[in-house]
Image (spheres, rainbow, N blue to C red):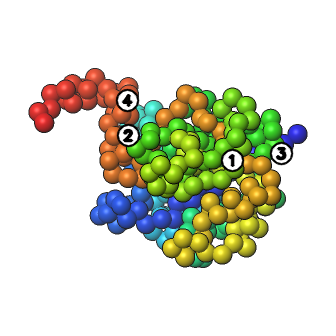
Amino acid sequence: MAQKIRKAIIPAAGFGTRFLPATKAMPKEMLPVVDKPIIQYVVEECVASGIEDIVIVTGWHKRSIEDHFDYPYELEKRLLEAGKDKQAEEVRRIAEMANFIYVRQKGPYGNGTPVLNARDVIGSEPFAILWGDEFIYSNPPRLKQMIDVWEKYGVPNVSAVRIPEQNLGKYGIADVSDVAAGIFKVNRIVEKPKPGEAPSDLAAHGAWIMPPRLFELLAEIQPGKDNEIWLQDAITALAKEQDVYAVEIQNGKYYDTGNKLEYLKTVVEFGLKHEELNGDFRNFLKGLSL
C-alpha cells in the first residue's frame, strides 16, 4: 500500500515581475480573485484533498502570506463585536485549515530551489508540490485525483491538461504512453516546444506527487537553462529511474493567474460566479460600451 500523502510544498518566493508595480510590495500569490487571494485557492485544494501539513517557501518580501494564514485574534474580536459573525468565522477558518510551516528560500535561482529548501520539513515521506500563483479548479479537486492515482499505482505523478495547439509553446508538453483511461506514462517532457515539435497536446505541470528521492536528485543536478536549478530536470532524472505518470485532470479548468491577461479573465469568471455579485456584475459587463 502506498504511503499516505500528508504534506504539500507551495513555492511562493518569486518576485512577480510580470505584475509590477502591483507586486512591488504585494506578493503575486496574494493578488485577489474577487475576495480571496490566489494562494488561498491552492491551499483549499490541498486541504480538500486530505493534506495536513502545508509548507510554504517564501522570501523576505512575502510576509503578508504568513499573516494571511495566521490566527487573527484582534480582527476576529472586532468582527464579533460588530455582529459580523460570518466574517469572523471565515477568518478563523483560514487559520485553522491546516498546519502551516514557513521556510525562507535560500540557494541558487530556479524553481527547484524552493522545493529543495523544504527537504528537512518533509523528511522521508512522499509529498505534493503545487505552485502558489496558479490553480486548477475541478471536482473532485485536482490533487485528490492525483492522490487517488498514487494510492492505486504507487507511482509519482504530475497533473496534466489538454492545451490548444496555438498555446503548446507556452508549456512543458509530455510525450506519453497509455496506462489507463486518463493516466499516461511520461517518456519525456518537451519544455515550450517550437511549432510542430510538440509530442502531444498534454501539458504536464502545476502539481506533482513525488517521492523523497526527488530531493537527492535536486541536490545533485547541475544548473540548467539560464544557469538555474530546474524542478523539471530533477523529475526527468527521476523518470529515468522509475515510472512517472501524468494524470489528465477531469472536470477541471486551468487558471494561469501568473500572467496579466489570464489573471483578469479569472477575476471576471469568478466574479460572474460569486453569489453576492453575479447579477449586478453581469449587468455591468453587459452595459459596457467597448
Q: Amino acid at mark 4?
A: His
Residue at the spot x=51%, y=69% of the render? 59
Q: Which residue is mark 3?
A: 3
Q: Which residue is mark 4?
A: 274
Q: Earlier in the sequence, mark 1 or mark 4?
A: 1
Badge 4 density bin: few <14, some 14–19, many ≥20, Cα 10 Å? some
| Residue 274 x, y percent position in the rendering | 37, 29
Looking at this view, name the residue that lies furthest to the front: 196
Disc 4 to disc 3, how far (Cα)?
38 Å
Q: Which residue is mark 2?
A: 266
Q: Amino acid at mark 2?
A: Thr
Q: Which residue is mark 1?
A: 186
Pick the front one: 65 or 270: 270
Disc 3 to disc 2, how far (Cα)?
35 Å
Residue at the spot x=13%, y=36% of the render? 290
- Label 4 element class: loop
Q: Earlier in the sequence, mark 2 or mark 4?
A: 2
Q: Amino acid at mark 1?
A: Val
Q: Amino acid at mark 3?
A: Gln
